[in-house]
Amino acid sequence: MARNLTMLTDLYQLTMINGYFKCGTQNQKAAFDLFYRGSNGYSYAIVAGLEQAIDYVKNLHFDDDDIDYLRSLGIFGEEFLNELKKFRFTGDIKAVPEGTLIFPNEPIMTVIAPMFEAQLVETALLNIINHQTLIATTASRLCECTKGAISEFGLRRAQGPDAGLYGARAAYIGGCRSTSNVLAGQMFGIEVKGTHSHSWVMSFPTEYDAFEAYAKVYPDSCLLLVDTYDTLKSGVPNAIRVFNKLKAGGHKPLGIRLDSGDLAYLSRQARKMLDEAGFPEAKIFVSNDIDEKVLLALAQQDAKIDVYGIGTKLITSFNNAALGGVYKLSAIEEDGKMIPKIKVSNSPEKTTNPGLKKTVRVLVDGMAAADLICLHDDEFDTSKPLTVYHPEQTWKKTTFDKYELKELMVDVFKDGKLVYDIPSLKEIGEYCDKSKGEFFPEYRRVTNTQEYKVDLSDNMWKLKHKLLGGR
């Protein structure tokens, strides 16, 4: 859904590009990297939001109303405002495709454009990529905790309509391939799922009456919420009575839903009751404030659950409020050459990697073994051994003899023109499954995660330390 989000920016982006304009450096080419830091507790991330970022860049322009508003602030001159009227993106963007599993400090996106353009797009790109990547990663982590399917049910708890809508899209990419969000289903082609609430049951004289009425309306997709009064003494027995009627009429019930109580115990007992009644194929669907810890505990307790509906803890990324993505200058043009730039900090994780760069993934027998953050013109001879080092504890090293290299970023915009074929959401989901499948489970698990090797290439390491040594 293309919208003009040009004004979705922080004021300081506009004051800076006004400053560049006043200084005559607005056309100086600059490179910025968008990446996330590792301090947020997520050892890996699933890239999401590129399609919406593309829509944003394609529609960049200032409307008359935008110019009028900026004029009303009293801090911009007419010459600058006239320049904004002509604003279009003319630069290059490389990005990691949606659904790719990536690690801290690896560029998700690189923008190379005149400073006037490259600076302005920072806020919106971070807003789009940070949010969807966060939700896709949260969804992926939840899916790692269970063999059951997960459906995204968070719209009513999302922080606003856009968060609910694009959160459902991101959750799909991460592995939750259905949603309760009807608009997300319509816009993105996601399978929509839902049954009835407790109010349906309470609006009828008895629980059985409510179940029977629902079964008459939806005989071939009957999923009954069984915990309004007493799950095992009333809900499941009444559901079985209705299922027997459906079966006699040639229909196949879908199953039951639990929304409260001890889900492990109740699901085991309900499974036993359904099986003994002749409904082994009836599915057990559960909801009720489920997160990673709950999923792991339910698996440990041999819960008999087929599908989880997860809302609040997924759509809000309840256990991790923000991805921590940043957008940092890495190079700037001087005398026709791109000169590497580095941001230095007393906090090592905030010291950036300089220069135009790329990330290559080392694959051994088709499985990911390490990543290298490299300079853009680094070349490798895969017929020779490759040694990677721990970025800080450099005595830790691994040498690969037989391996393949895969570059992670692709061209998206060249000279302001879109050169990337945007895949369907279904294709992105399949690509995400493939990307995750390249990693052994120990790198994806949510507790006691094995550290994945991410190293700097020799040339990148030398450049970084040269720049640090000059300060």
Image: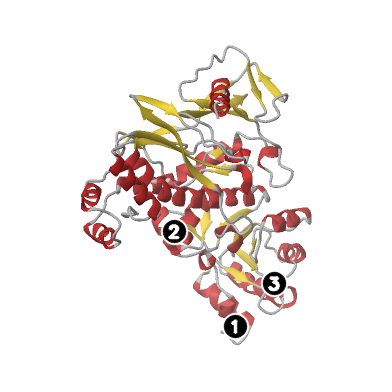
Give me the disc on residue 311: none
In the figure, 429 relative to 206: above or below? above
> Is 20 or 203 nearer to us in this picture?
20
Q: Position of residue 247 (x, y in %)?
A: 60, 67
**Residue at image x 65%, y 16%?**
401
Q: Is residue 197 visible?
A: yes
Q: Earlier in the sequence, mark 2 or mark 1?
A: 2
Secondary structure beneath label 3:
helix
Secondary structure beneath label 2:
helix
Marks 2 and 1: which is nearer the front? 2
Q: Position of residue 81 (x, y in %)?
A: 24, 52
Q: Amino acid at mark 2?
A: Ala
Q: Earlier in the sequence, mark 2 or mark 3?
A: 2
Rendered-image quadrant of the C terminus? top right
The answer to whether the residues at label 2 and label 1 have Cβ atoms under 8 Å apart is: no
Residue at the disc numbered 3:
236
Residue at the disc numbered 1:
202
Residue at the disc numbered 2:
184
Q: CA distance from mark 2 to mark 1?
A: 29 Å
**Residue at image x 56%, y 68%?**
222
Mark 1, Cα crowd under 10 Å, few <14 / some 14-19 / many 20+, is few
Extreme residue in the top direction: 383
Q: CA distance from mark 2 to mark 3?
A: 32 Å
Marks 2 and 3: which is nearer the front? 2
In the figure, 217 relative to 28: above or below? below
The answer to whether the residues at label 2 and label 3 have Cβ atoms under 8 Å apart is: no
Q: Earlier in the sequence, mark 3 or mark 1?
A: 1
Q: Amino acid at mark 1?
A: Met
Is 116 on the left or on the right of 175, as rendered?
A: left
> Is 189 or 393 nearer to us in this picture?
393
Q: Is residue 9 visible?
A: no
Q: Position of residue 243 (x, y in %)?
A: 62, 70
